[in-house]
Amino acid sequence: MKLNQCLQASGSVRRRAAVGASAAVFGLTAVLGTGLVSAANADDPATLSGVVLTVGSSESQRVVSWYASANTSQVVEVAPTSTLVAGEFPDDSVTMTFPATVAANLVNGGFNGHATIDGLQEDTAYSYRAGVEGAWSPTYSFKTQDFEGDFDFLFFGDPQIGASGNVANDGAGWADTLNVASAANPNAELLVSGGDQVETANTESQWDAFLAPAQLRQYPWAATIGNHDVGGKAYEQHFWTPNTDRSAPFYTGSSNSGGDYWYIYKDVLFIDLNSNAYASGSDAAHLQYVTDVINAHGAAAKYTVLVYHHAIYSPASHANDSDAKVRRQDFPTTFSNLGVDLVLQGHDHAYSRSYLIKNGQKANPDEQPGAAEVEQGPGGVVYVTGNSASGSKYYALTNPVAGEFGPDPLDNSAGRKRHYANSVESQENKRSYVKVEVRHDRLVVEDIRSEVSPNGAVGSTIDKVAIRPYHGEGQSIQVDVPQAGPGEFGWEIDGDNSLVDLGEAAEGTGFFLASGDINPITVTDTRTSGAAWAVNGQVTDFQDGDKTFSSKYLGWQPHVFAEGAGAAAGDPVESGFNNGTGLSVSRTLGSAAAGHSLGDTELGADLNLKFPTSIDKGNYRSTLTITAVS
């Protein structure tokens, strides 16, 4: 019998960019597009507008996009904010320059540009500007956080500026939601879109109102294309997205925008789909795309979050759209099999949070509506639909239609009932946004009011749930590895959710130390033969994405906590820091000789992790496999 225990090293994820001994090192890249870049024309500098900050491929990248009046050579300049003097950028030894790709604007004439900022350092405030000497945009700023560990991001459903018929009112509501959300969550690290930024794809007055809030130049926007964003190129011209596949199945016509894309931010693999691409086998192509991306990059992340516009489990007028019906058959089993954790959706202008869904059905029949905490288990996925973030349009909740997306049997209300897949459905006809807390042992999803309603004040909670991830059968052991340097570090054991938390490593002279203990293992032997038995353990290498360190550095001191079944503790095993193989080979936790007494025993072990300070900072996890032999 084998019991797999997951040993995890969690903490802040080490920066993926190289860092010099005394100075930050920047990469120099440009994302290439299909347009041509002309030579600079000093006599005709471009005037820039619509500047927006968006996500890059990782936490060490950002993309800046804009509109330009002229097809000149343009760049983005970036420098640590602390180096600016009276708003002026320092000399070239500090300021880094990233060349832009400039292409013809196919909507209203003019041009659009974008540049990828690379090699950002963690915990740093940066200032940036786009353009060329003598014709710069205003200077904007953003701040990176620690590149490892916990973080929060904010999800916004359907701003759809212009949907009410009053662009100014819609823009004001959108700006107010961003003000409320950023004031309450100043250290949020991503703003994630549910799609439908505007009502009419190529109406630039709507885009101007959408892009007006300062937060869209301070926090990276992770764009999602909605059905109102297609019909022209404006979406694609305003937002350059990383790792984007614009093949035919993911695009929505030669004149439109789209593409499926992915990026990794800290410990989350985000995959964004163009759900407008629906016909001619596109759904099969989307599923293959998700499969390929997770197979290629899923091991580098601890959570997978999918984002697309057209909700498949939603509570309002789009709940039984024909495409939703088909996708409820196509999507859920693949998402469950791939271990997707959370799906964020828009389109229905009302809030919903599903039960844990496995293969299209409730994963746990006993899960109750509105549960504050759920245990994911194998294949469990939570689907969330965001309400309007601008207040431009709301849809009323609808009654389930008997059949494929019928009523929840746990809903005993006399009036309108919830759809069977949804744990919570809400429509207050007031603006809200969704906050997602990414923690080493859970995802917390919270729908928050951004304007007062009869049910609560601004900033109050509409719905909140903690999603406990599935680590497999057994226990997880977690250790925080800090950046090597002076200082004392303490340890705290965390056995919650079968995760053994070794805390953050304390630094000695040339080594890190961490300690803790595994959750106890009970052995029962009631066989009359009294045959000998042994329980052994072996540890895989600690891993955080593509970073690893050897399991030989982990040792243990076995114990028998409750005598019985003739149990004797195994021999202590030292860390292999100086020599030896530690727990990288099978070691005995406890054993009993032939003819032993019958009954139960409880085995455990103190863990001793000693490893070099040359190990990269990160959030590492390993698996301790316990094998019972008799």
Image: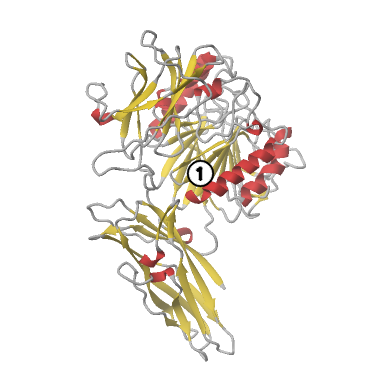
Classify 249 as above or below 360: above
Classify 592 as above or below 307: below
Residue occupying the far bottom of the picture: 595
Residue 619 shown left or right of residue 397 in the figure: left
Residue 518, given in percent of the width and then of the height, sits at: 42, 67
Nearer-the-camera pick, 454 or 450:
450
Nearer-the-camera pick, 116 or 522:
116
In the rendered image, which quarter contains the C terminus? bottom right
> On the image, which quarter does residue 504 sit in?
bottom left
Residue 413, given in percent of the width and then of the height, sits at: 67, 42
Q: Can residue 63 be seen in this snapshot?
A: yes
Amino acid type at image mark 1: Leu
Question: How would you rate the neighbour count of disc 1 (Cα within 10 Å): few for under 14, some for 14-19, many for 20 or more?
Answer: many
Nearer-the-camera pick, 571 or 385:
571
Number of marks present in the image shown: 1
Element at badge 1?
A: strand
Residue 92, given in percent of the width and then of the height, sits at: 27, 27
Residue 139 shown left or right of residue 6 in the figure: left
> On the image, which quarter does residue 493 sit in?
bottom left
Residue 369, given in percent of the width and then of the height, sits at: 61, 47
Residue occupying the far top of the picture: 43
Q: Can residue 466 be seen in this snapshot?
A: no
Give the residue number, with chain letter if any, for mark 1: 269
Classify 246 as above or below 403: above
Which residue is found at the position 34% from the left and 69% from the top? 575
In the rendered image, which quarter contains the N terminus? bottom right
Residue occupying the far front of the picture: 39
